[in-house]
Amino acid sequence: MAKNRISYLMSMPYMLLFCVFTLVPVCASIALSFTYYNLLESPRFVFMENYRRLFLQDDIFLTAGMNTFVFAAITGPVSYIACFVLAWAINDFHPKVRAFLTVVFYAPSISGAVYIIWQLIFSSDAYGIMNTLLMQLGITYDPILWLEDPRYVLSCVIVVAIWCSLGTSFLTFIAGLQGLDRSLFEAAAVDGMKNRFQELWYITLPSMRPQLMFGAVMQITAAFGVGDISANLAGNPSVDYSAHTVVNHITDYGNVRYEMGYACAIAVILLVVMVGTNKAVQNLLRKVGD
Amino acid sequence: MNLLSSRSKRVNRNTAGNITSFLLLSVLALFMAFPLVYVILNAFKPLSELFLYPPKFYVVNPTLDNFRDIVILMSQSYVPFTRYFFNTVFITAVGTFGHLIAASMCAFCLAKHDFPGRRIMFNAVVLALMFSPAVTSIPVYIIMARLGLVDTYLAVILPAFQFSLGLYLMKQFMETVPDAVLESARIDGAGEVRLWWKIVMPMVKPAWLTLILLTVQQLWNSTSPFTYSEELKTLPLALSQILAGGIARTGAGSAVAVLMMIIPLTAFILSQANVLETMSTSGMKD
């Protein structure tokens, strides 16, 4: 028992803060989602009213949900596959080239100035580099209002999100690939394995399962959590809610309208979708190579 | 030295394949690097080149005017520029240090001790990786308000202590420390705290460099919604006010972007080998 006490004592600082800023908030979110709460009066229990309103009355929530779904369905798989394929391709080169390419691909995700950069590129006047390019090539005659025209906003946000999505998972895959046992491949070559793609399918992917699972969690959570990119590039709310996401909707009700109970109901739905998708994909990846 | 192949000869690789793969990668690398390079070049363009039509990608007469503009704009602000800088450095330093200590101490117990509740604790942290902070933003704000943390440094620093990714990576890496090393130290009479600090921590240097890198990245660019006094604002918030000046600030804006990316990029370039070593243990076991 004395030995257990030191374990609890040493994990306490982290666990205490983890409870206060992560665990309790998740429980509180669920509890508050059944109430009407505006910060001034104490929460009033309304049971399913918030959820009923969300699905039956709030058209903008449905738009936000649809946008988030489209966004996640594109950026999630694309960024996940890009992380793996790039890591796999880079792994064949000399360590110096590998290190250089790693920095080039990883840099966008940590540069921190994403919005400033892309606002320059998607600038709506003729000085914007994207408009210049299209006008010089004769594809368009007038500058396109990339971030103001509802037809283009969501696509722009998706491009930017994919551009800066090669983060932690990418590094995990690079590291995992370097740790693979070389003798496996040599043995397989003796047994008649002919090219790098057979190697990838029969040896590399199955041995990378733990990394693939971790990478999936990172990419899925990021894909559904999109909000900042859209708010910073297109504004919150964006024109016609064309790039409005569920996270933007939470901010709108929580930080602008102070309808805390309603905002929590939105958050709970997002939580269920994120964790549910993560768990489902984990189960799928467990089957890789079996 | 053949740069297009890894150091030791590998099976199932041919030169044609390597060259094709290298060319494809180069094209993609150009696409990835283009926006960053463009903004860096822009930061050194004089006014006349910024508003040239058609715009040029490269710089003809590089100048530091845009960086000088930032200094001038900042010297007119209500709070001195150095204060924003101090805030960012202070939050980043304290947040990173606290996270490193709290997370590695907890990770040590989760990885190397066997006590009731250990699995539940770790599973809770893994679960936290599966949703983004936006989900909990409302209750976190209410809790901060109740604890009187709103508009203090602690509102940014304390949540940073419990980043779940850091604990996860640290715990996975600490599992690679051989139990025999710990046992022999225990026989020599070392206590658990001493064991963690004197034996395990020096052995997991790559992991704590990774934690430092990840936390610095987060905090350096953080724009916390929980502080609103001008005196507590961080560099990114102050710099975004420059951008609010609109089109006339295009040059200064690019210079701002360059200033913001220098720290995280340099940190990664310096720690790349260690970070990759940590990531090699990051996989999720069934």
Image: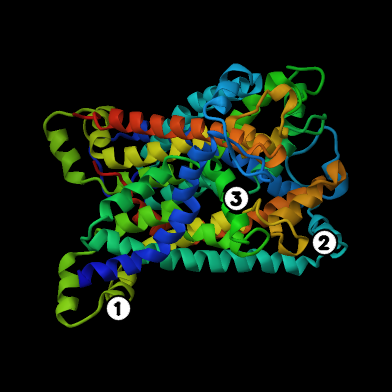
Q: Which residue is mark 2?
A: B74
**Residue drawn at point x = 56 percent, y = 20 percent:** A55
Q: Mark on residue B194? A: 1
Q: Mark on residue B142? A: 3
Mark 3 burial class by Cα count in 10 Å: few <14, some 14-19, many 20+: some
Q: Position of residue B158 (x, y in %)?
A: 53, 61
CA gap, disc 1 to disc 3?
38 Å
Mark 2 burial class by Cα count in 10 Å: few <14, some 14-19, many 20+: some
Q: Mark on residue B98? A: none
Amino acid, disc 2: Met
Q: Is residue A83 left or right of residue A238?
A: left
- Quarter of the picture containing the N terminus of chain A is bottom left
Closer to the camera in the image, B162 or A58: A58
Q: Position of residue A42 (x, y in %)?
A: 62, 44
Q: Secondary structure at mark 3?
A: helix
Q: Secondary structure at mark 1?
A: helix
Q: In the rendered structure, which disc, 3 or 2, sits on the residue that comes first in sequence?
A: 2
Q: Position of residue A122 (x, y in %)?
A: 72, 32
